Amino acid sequence: MSSQTYSISDLARELDITTRAIRFYEEQGLLAPERRGQERVYSPRDKVSLKLILRGKRIGFSLAECRELIELYDPTSGNQKQLNSMLGKIAERREQLEQQLLDIQQMQLELDTAEERCIQALEQTISSQATN
């Protein structure tokens, strides 16, 4: 791993997020930058963790799930535990999304039925008013 370090503004610019978001992830214990006086100094590992958090958020992982994955980070083992855990979480997320899709489709059918009943009731009201 390289000895390159990053300032909070470097990471924010490079990953297109706010410094406030980075500080939030630090407060949550997901990042652990070194301190040089008041300045935060981020390592390549912090950058990898931040990328993992952002990717996890995009695919719907909770911060707790992101934390689990970050804790499994171990480049010396090829990250096998982390990758296997991520595959499991991806499968779980996929199942959740499939269930949500079924729920949405069922709700759409219920909306269609409710809409048809409303239209029929309106048509009956209009036709009964026309005959009076």
Image (cartoon, rainbow, N blue to C red):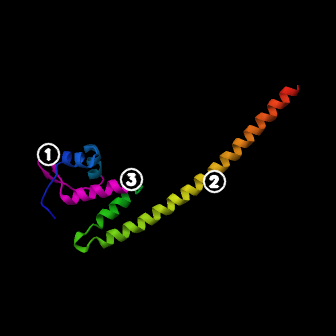
User: For the residues marked 3 and 2, what is the alpha-carbon distance in whole angstroms?
Assistant: 26 Å
Point out the tag, 3 or 1, that comes first from the N-terminus: 1
Q: Is residue 87 above or below residue 131?
A: below
User: For the residues marked 3 and 1, what is the alpha-carbon distance in whole angstroms?
Assistant: 31 Å
- For disc 3, the marked residue is 58
Q: Disc 3, disc 2: CB below 8 Å?
A: no
Q: Which mark is residue 106?
A: 2
Where the N terminus falls, by quadrant?
Answer: bottom left
Foreground mark, 1 or 2?
2
The residue shown at (22%, 49%) is 11
Where the C terminus falls, by quadrant?
Answer: top right
Circle 2: residue type: Gln
- For disc 1, the marked residue is 38
The residue shown at (19%, 59%) is 44
Circle 3: residue type: Arg
Start-end of magenta stretch: 28-56
Residue 4, quarter of picture: bottom left
Residue closest to the far right: 132
Foreground mark, 3 or 1?
3
Point out the tag, 1 or 2, that comes first from the N-terminus: 1
Circle 1: residue type: Gln
Tell me: 110 left or right of 73.
right
